[in-house]
Amino acid sequence: MWLSAGTPFIGAIVLGILKPQGPSELLVQSFKMPSKSQSLMGQDGVRTFQDMLYQHARAMSHVSVYYATEEVGVSELLHTLVQVLKKGSKLVFLGSGKSFKIILKTVAMLTSLGIDSRYLHPSEALHGDMGAVRPGDALVVCSSSGETQELVQFLEHAGRVLEPSVKVLVTSSTQSTLHALVDQVLYVPQPVQFQEKTLQDGLPSPTVSTTLMLTVLDCFCLALTELYFDGDTARRREFFRKMHPGGGIGKQSQVPVPVPVPVLMPMALHKDAVGAPIDSTVCGHVPDGASESEFLQSIVQFDYCVVAGVRYDSHVLQHRYREWKRSMPAFPLKYSADRSWNLAALLASAVVAANQADSM
């Protein structure tokens, strides 16, 4: 017998094969299966972990797609707050619950970048701390629902006794009590399919909403500090280096890091939002007459695509293609993919579809 005594697992399989029996009997003899409860517990926990990571990514992608076309409101708010800062006033952030924890991080980030800012808890503000607000300061209140009663009470009182230059609401709600009490809104879109009750078996514990609010505020603050430093990102970087000598970041900032020189595409259009060139390996060109398959290949292969002289993030084009495809009537499998293909129509109709979807 060639089978050694030191290979019991293989031996069991071989013996099972040699002895005539059914597949189910062989499986039982060859493997010691985990109990049903152990198997389901492990699978459900890991699957939930994986699914929630994916849902967070999808929700964040939705926000990115929304702001790919919504530029005016952000631009106006950025310039409003920069003017507040240039006049020597400060930004005062308020939030309750998880939103308060988010504004702690936001204020810490802004302070490290030279922006005069402060956080207030609305309950403490109503007990005297609102004395920190000076005439001309900007009030930025953060509430996913837009219905936080402490913030409602604070803004109603602030409107009577304080003199803020502007009141801003950061929220995922399109209509709320707080909307009526502010001047401008920084919207954090979170449609019903990305809300916690939908994704977490009815559990309303804040997860996706806090991720979205923190991310939107981080991105907004980076844009705000860039404008505050008049686009001089080197000066902003140097200020941060001086203010952050400790920790791993402080240690790394003392070591000069060479900036890689990207290989440019021949077109001057291939630049990012601040005019920096984009590596040719991540930006492609989609010709006006591209077929549907060529378009799909480009938006999968590249991170950015230039279509009709406009640079798009590829995930935005993927979203627009998906919305366009869903709006098309069903067709047989033998139907040609390119028969109804029209790139210009896709780009035009998808903008409308995206706006309608977000308003639901």
Image (tube, helix red, strand yellow):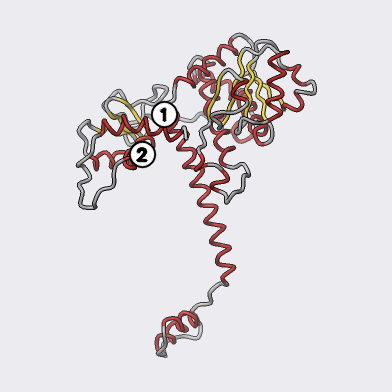
What's the amino acid at mark 2? Glu
**Image location of residue 258, percent across then percent down:** 45, 30
State the residue position of label 1. Answer: 68
- Asked whether, in this view, residue 134 is left or right of residue 268, the answer is right
Distance in Å between CA atoms under marks 2 and 1:
15 Å
Q: Establish if 360 lies above or below 94.
A: below
**Image location of residue 15, percent across then percent down:** 44, 87
Name the image quarter holding residue 317: top left
Residue 244 shows in this picture: no
Tell me what residue is drawn at x 46 percent, y 42 percent: 58
Secondary element at tag 2: helix
Q: Which mark is residue 273?
A: none
Q: Nearer the viewer, residue 278 or 133?
A: 133
Q: Nearer the viewer, mark 2 or mark 1?
A: 2
- Asked whether, in this view, residue 279 is left or right of residue 114, the answer is left
Secondary element at tag 1: helix
Residue 12 shows in this picture: yes
- Asked whether, in this view, residue 206 is left or right of residue 11, the answer is right
- Asked whether, in this view, residue 92 is left or right of residue 262, the answer is right
Name the image quarter holding residue 247: top right
What residue occupies the far top of the structure in this picture?
87
Q: Nearer the viewer, residue 270 or 332?
A: 332
State the residue position of label 2. Answer: 323
Q: Local crowd at mark 1 within 10 Å, few (<14), some, or many (≥20)?
A: few
Tell me what residue is drawn at x 62 percent, y 12 percent: 165
What's the amino acid at mark 1? Ala
**Image location of residue 301, percent across then percent down:** 32, 41
In the picture, the quarter occupied by the N terminus is bottom left
